[in-house]
Image (cartoon, rainbow, N blue to C red):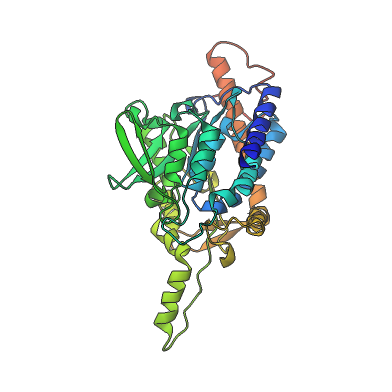
Amino acid sequence: MAPILLFTLVFATQLMAGLSSPPPPLPPPSYGNRTSILSIDGGGIRGIIPATVLEYLENALKKKDPDTSLAHYFDVMSGTSTGGLMATMLAAPNPSDSNHPLFTSSQIVRFYKTYGPKIFEPRFFPSCPKYNGKFLPYLIDSILKETRLNQTLTNIVIPTFDQRRVMPVIFSNFKLKTETYLNAKLSDICLGTSAAPTYLPSHKFKNEGVYFNLVDGAMAANNPAVVAVSEVIQHSERKDMIMLSLGTGIVKPPLQMVRGFFEEACELYWTITHSGVISEALFSTDITHYYLATVFPGLLPPENYLRIQEYSLNPSLEPLDNADEKNMNKLEKVGDGLLQQKVKRMNVNTFVPVELDHTNAQALDSFAEKLYEERQLRLKRKSIAKGRRPSIENVKVPSGEIRVI
């Protein structure tokens, strides 16, 4: 059944790409005003949450440009673990039309709901890692085949951790000119960043004589936003940025523990039963916002940085491997519910999210407008630089909204 479902999902993507006209690729940031970045956290099956949010953004962009995709609007897509898997599928070229991506956001939601139960299929006997990890390589290899990092529609930045060399390995298009051994197959990159310790086995492969033994990118950066910004600063001509950062939900810890004789026991119990919260602290999600706000304030001002996160996730939804149908439906509802919540911006002094006066859906609509204007500006400037008038079919510049400087 799984091969049939896989064929149906991929074939539908290829068919839609074949029926539509190819949009022009996004010109480099040198033609525009700022570099656009998408960052997606890790979180296993909870990746359904950011995928649902991205579906809203993609639909908002399609209202302005029906034949578009997220890869035609973001200069960089960065993701860790499940976020890395998602970023790669959004940036990988479609085999039947290399101008279109392999997956849309809505298809990624269906991907999780269709294959999650097979990826996290329980073993008959308890073991470590918890899952044998055989289905995911088969699935990813079937989808991505021989496609390599240098073939993506836009730049991707995927953190992993090499447990053999005990060091982070960042797979980034920006590094390929000097570090050619990083031009690995996308399937190997995906399997490496998603190999969560104790859940899935590490992913071993060899490329250009270099041996990799990779585990979950969360060991390096569960929130890859800073990694993406660092890559842009090092390698991009345009330093001004606009970023959308998506979380996979965190459980709100209790305000205080039970006092008295059982205090230490309660603290130990909470630590054991909320290991995901501990992981959030260890792998720097909140501290990421501190870095972005204090180290890069001129490059990424508050109005150009949108973070969407569920800060009070129901504890029953916390496990990253609960691929039960009811649980996945609830995660999708969390994503839908996030759209109606007010935007929350992290107070870098207290690390407490502060609620703003507009919803995430409204913020995404505004973000889509900024992405659209930036793309149209680049297309127009590129056409002028080549000494010809902008193409009417490809460049839909709203009158009075964009000026060529």
Q: Which of 237 and 213 is in front in this view?
A: 213
Q: Residue furthest top?
A: 387
The residue at the far front in this view is 124
Whether residue 327 is situated above or below residue 258 in the rendered picture = above
Q: Quadrant of residue 378?
A: top right
Q: Position of residue 303 (x, y in %)?
A: 55, 46
Is residue 157 something one can see in this rendering?
no
Q: Residue at x 42, y 46 (%)?
A: 226
Q: Residue at x 37, y 28 (%)?
A: 176
Which quadrant of the figure contains the N terminus?
top right
The image position of residue 321, as x and y in percent, is 53, 56
Farthest residue in the left direction? 165
Quadrant in which the C terminus is drawn: top right
Image quarter of residue 191: top left
Q: How many marks?
A: 0
Q: Is residue 18 left or right of residue 138?
A: right
Residue at image location 57% in from the left, 16% down from the top: 383
- Position of residue 388 measured from the top left corner of the image (x, y, whole percent): 59, 11
Q: Where is residue 154 shown, x and y percent of the image?
A: 51, 30
Q: Is residue 216 left or right of residue 86?
A: left
Q: Nearer the viewer, residue 7 or 86?
A: 7
Figure check: 186 above or below 392: below
Figure check: 86 above or below 382:
below
> Is residue 264 at all visible to an observer of this figure?
yes
The one of 125 and 160 positioned closer to us in this rendering: 125
Identify the residue shown where x is 51% and y is 73%: 254
